[in-house]
Amino acid sequence: MTEVRSKPLRMALIGGGGAGFIGKVHATAATLDREAVLVAGALSSNAERSRQAAAEFGIPTHRAYGSWRELLEAESRRPKDERVNFVSIATPNFTHCEIACAAMESGFHVVCDKPMAINLNDAQQMVTAVQQTGRVFALTHNYSGYPLMRQAREMIASGELGEIIAVRATYVQGWMHGMVPGAQQDRGAWKSDPRRNGRAGSLGDVGTHAFHLASFVTGLEPEQLLSSMQSISDHHELDDYGHAMIRFRQGGTGMITWSQVTHGRLNDLSIEVDGTKAALTWCQEEPNQLYVRSLGKPVRIYERDPNAAHAAPTAIAACRLPGGHPEAFFEAFANVYRDAFADMRRVNAGEAFDRSLSLYPSVQDGYAGVRFMTRCLDSNDSNSQWQDW
């Protein structure tokens, strides 16, 4: 590899300024391991606010741009050893396709927030852009970055749980009960606007996380889907509660549940997988323990410990601290970035890379997430009829 690993990749952040938190998460996660440095940004759709927000991220004034188009044009003109290597997209859902495709066509790698797009046409356009440009594209389904989710993935792949019978993934929150209809929101106001968010409300916001985690851990592929959704909160007309039942091609069933109107829940993402030999359970709010149960045997608790004899190689690689020191959201998010960086460096050095060997969520995972949203909407629109995948 011709590019020295210790030389940080140069990052540009698009969106994420103002009261929103996800831009700061991207900036923190990308730079956590000092493999990247944030050097440029277009942080708002308003040119003045975009430039003003740059100081908060430590972006120098001369690389604080008024729009993402200005950023791509200006960075493209810089010498190769100065321009940014990749852009991180933390903008409203409906903008992802246009920005990501333009960035890849300009020669930049892309890390995009989820869901990848608001419809299948846009998602396919993004798949095509990745194929045609050869750029690295990563999607921040960050929960797949937790060490114990990678442990679970390897346990299932090795047959430790036996044949998979069922998977249940649930992501429930309750913050919408605090919303006041018609009141100005400090952040995320676009999420209640179907023109900017798409028709998938909580389904797109948290349901796609649960679906991706179930797919990531089990490797199962949907064959048919049935869904029912509701809109309970008065502050919008999009879904805020729903279920999807899935029949998998390999056999077995799945249940995905999402809610942002469940009182008292914060970020309660959990997954349960039932196999013919054993079952496992994991909860994102207690991410450093994985429970495995078999009939007639004591419950086994796998802890996030890179020195444990049972630790899978991918779980060890996802750890930064010794066992007993909690690792959580930022570290998992950073693992998506770190995995993507490895492929970015390979491409930058002119080397081939096998995407199937990488763990970060890809453009194909993003397409599957948009298909999941689409099929859920199709099923709900048809009075909960089964839909072919």
Image: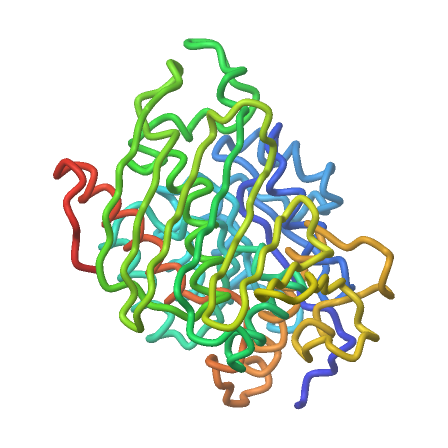
Q: Is residue 310 above or below residue 278?
A: below
Asked if residue 93 lies left or right of residue 273, the reply is: left
The outermost residue toward the front is 296
In the image, taking residue 258 as reference, residue 223 lies left or right, namely: left
Nearer the observer, 17 or 68? 17
- Of residues 23 and 4, the one drawn nearer to the viewer in this rendering: 23
Q: Position of residue 300 (x, y in %)?
A: 70, 64
How many numbered markers are drawn? 0
Q: Residue at x 38, y 70 (%)?
A: 130
Locate residue 175, reporting x and y percent.
54, 24
Horizontal side of residue 50 vs 229, given as left or right: right
Quadrant that contains the N terminus: bottom right
Query: What's the residue at 73%, 56% (across, down)?
Result: 288
Out of 126 and 223, give the one closest to the viewer: 223
Colour setting: rainbow
Dividing the picture into quarters, in which one does residue 165 lie?
bottom left
From the top left corner, tell me how far across and down residue 301 is, in percent.
72, 61
Residue 189 percent across, percent down from the top left: 46, 24
On screen, 24 above or below 150? above
| Quarter occupied by the C terminus | bottom left
Residue 269, compared with residue 29, is above or below; it is above
- Residue at (49%, 71%) from the top-left corner? 136
